[in-house]
Amino acid sequence: MNQEQWEHFYRSICLDFDFDPDLDFKSSLLLSSILQDKSRKELLEKFRGDTFYVVGNGPNLSQALDLIGKGTTIVADSALEVFLESGRVPDIVVTDLDGSIASLRNAYNMGAIMVIHAHGDNRKLISEYAEEFSGNAVGTTQNRPVDGIYNFFGFTDGDRAAYIAHYLDAVKIYLVGFDFETPVSKESTDPSRKKRKLNWAKTLLEELSKERGTSLGGGPIIPL
């Protein structure tokens, strides 16, 4: 995917969810001001060319974790607590800071790189918590990039993680614990809204699979 293709998806996503792109951009500027020059995509370079396991929070996650082999693990925020409870340490965590801050702190303290996403709804969380992780963090946006804030493409933490793996020339990407039909929602989350987000995640992952010359299947572990 290139920036022009992404803009097409981004405009459609904003219309679907009534997002304000200006607020996304303001959130990016805020994150940039906090992380400053500590946010460097070069932090991710040590994983380039590896096999990647992208971990999402589907209802089958606990069983799917046993299928992870040797490679780099990128864990979506919502799956992090279960991942840590299994005794594993993530290499990279993709988060918009709306999950368990305690789990994020634990992963960070064990050396995980935090990929922190800025969007219009999480400016308060960025103000409160982003600086804690600034020693080993990369900032991302779904809007246009600004200083130290990158757009690797993707909408939800899970599909954005897969796009990051692709950016890093992944030999193979495995989606672990992804379920596009059964939303796992937080108490305050509207299940229908969550399902629409999953639909977009699936659409974007299908787009990525085409680019990689594969097809998006199903099951507890999905090769991409």
Image (cartoon, rainbow, N blue to C red):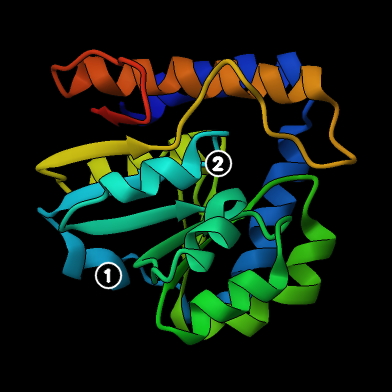
Rendered position, 50 above or below 7: below
Say few, some or many: other residues with alpha carbon within 10 Å of mark 1 (under 14 / 14 to 19 / 20 or more). Answer: few
The label on residue 26 is none
Left or right of 90 on screen, residue 198: right
- Depth check, mark 2 against mark 1: the one in front is 2
Q: Looking at the picture, how far across and down is residue 123, in whole percent?
A: 79, 58
In the rendered structure, find residue 42 and report the number of the disc placed on it: 1
Q: Circle 2: is it few (<14), some (14-19), or many (20+) Cα within 10 Å?
A: many
Q: Return the x and y of residue 221 as percentages of the image width and height.
A: 31, 32
Q: Which residue is drawn at 58% across and 15% down?
A: 181
Q: Residue at x 38, y 71 (%)?
A: 40
Q: Is mark 1 on a helix, strand or loop?
A: helix
**Residue at (27, 70) in percent of width and height:** 42
Q: Mark 2 points at which residue?
A: 57
Q: Which of marks 2 and 1 is nearer the N terminus?
A: 1
Q: Residue at x 39, y 71 (%)?
A: 89
110 sits left or right of 169 in the view? right
Work out whether residue 144 can be spotted: yes
Q: Which residue lies furthest to the right in this view?
A: 188
Quadrant position of the C terminus in the picture:
top left
Q: Nearer the viewer, residue 41 or 171?
A: 171
Gap in Å between the C-alphas at discs 2 and 1?
Answer: 27 Å
* Residue type at the position of mark 1: Glu
